Amino acid sequence: MRRTSIQRRLIAAVVISPLLLAIGIVSVAVYFTRRQLRNAFDAGLHGRAMSVAALVRYSEDEHPTLIFEDDLVPPPLEKEHPDLYQVTTGDGHLLARSPNWPQDLQAIPKKDRQHTAFTVNDIRYRAVRLEKVPVLDREGDAPSTDVLTVTYAAPTDQMTRAVAHAGIYIAAGSGLLLLVTVGIAVWGLRRGLRPLAELTAGAALVNASNWKLNPSDAALSPTELAPLTQAMTAMLEGLHRAFTQQREFLANAAHELKTPVAILKSTLQSLLQRPRAEDEYRAGLEQALDDMARLEQLMHSMLRLARAEQWAAGSARRDLQAVEVAATCESALEHLAPVARARGVTIHFVSNGPMPMRADADDLELVWSNLLENAIRFSPAGGNVQLRARSDGPRGYVEVEDNGPGISQSELAHLFERFHRGDSSRARDTGGYGLGLAISKALIEAYGGTITPQSGPGQGTRMVVEVPLENSAVRS
């Protein structure tokens, strides 16, 4: 893919837009200037034509006739090029014509037009035609019905030069303003994009050993960049946390797998060291099977946790049916009843009605089982565990509470970490690997819910699970 520069695109847009505007302004200004000068030129032509018409008078003879006093013709507009004029009567009789009137030039403009332009000897002229002009010098018995047709033409070189000079001045002024405007705009654009460049340079320094973005004050101050900077910072923190968790998970998984594998290897090696009796072989193989079972349980828990985290991240979609939350609680309670009786712990279950939820019944039962198992292990002999299920509109709540020694606030922060053991109840000899609460949290979050621990030293522990019920926004 071809690489492009946002800064170059913006600078090009900043340059092209004022340039087009300047071209448009110069064009409009030159057009109106030319129009105004032409109107003034036409007004001058009209005045000169009337001046020529005023030179026509009646003679003082017994029968007055029209005569033209050519010695009073006004001087031309340009000394280099003479003006042209022609005066005729209403019936087309020629009264006067300028000496330099071309022989092949007819009376112009045409009758249906007042002004026109033409070229004589490579000189551009503009002419005006006035019809039905009365004879102004009228005396005695002079007839009043005589009218004149006056055609007057003058060179337009002076007007053309004036238009050209005006266009040059307007273009020069517009170009100067354009340069100043574009210079300021480019400077402001580069200054405005500088925080983005600094943010990009800071982001380039992020790597597996440096997860800090460290944005400068210039990158944090713009309103447009603040959300981006905050989003990038949050994203890097999430990536760092996920990277750390993955690294710790691999290290912990390797450590947890090392122990049962080493025990299994030691058991098999001891069986092969010397010939043994049948009962000894049987006992050794049974020990090896127990070790394999623990290893299988660990692998199953790790896979279940990985799948739950994938669902929570939205990387897999499952078509789920509605299940009754209270029924899954009863199944988990029935499964752990022998464990509770063996430790002398009583479990009380209360539900306030139906709680339909789109979920996998086995997932929910696993969550309640993990929470109840921890509560039973935390509770002293003869203690009580409360299991409550209630609905509140579109949300459902399941609470598991024990009257054990409680958990410190520092310990609560690590309660849902994988392979974390904060007390003897989660030691290896009880069968725990520190994955139960991590799996429970991942499963609940996969269904769009939350799990919150509430505890303190000597106060017991309560786990509050909030889940979306049917007919609400369920994440599946």
Image (cartoon, grey):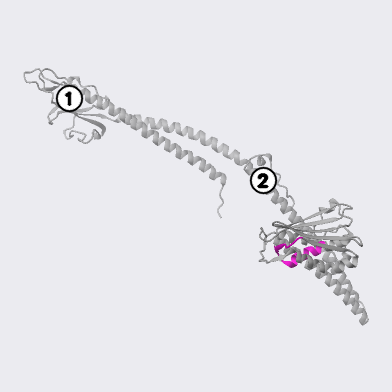
Asked if residue 357 is among those painted magenta in the image, a careful observer would answer yes
Residue 379 appears left or right of 311: right
Q: Nearer the viewer, residue 416 or 262?
A: 416
Q: Amino acid at mark 2?
A: Thr
Give the x, y percent position of residue 229.
67, 45
Task: Give, as a single range, the part of the protein colored magenta.
Answer: 352-371
Which mark is first along the chain, 2 or 1?
A: 1
Residue 180 appears left or right of 350: left
**Mark linked to residue 171:** none
Circles 1 and 2 in contact, beta carbons < 8 Å: no
- The quadrant holding residue 358 is bottom right
Residue 60 appears left or right of 288: left
- The quadrant holding residue 190 is top right
Asked if residue 195 is among those painted magenta in the image, a careful observer would answer no
- Residue at image mark 2: 229
- Residue at image mark 1: 134
Give the x, y percent position of residue 296.
80, 70
Q: Is residue 205 visible?
A: no
Q: Amino acid at mark 1?
A: Pro
Task: Measure the C-alpha gap from mark 1 to mark 2.
Answer: 86 Å
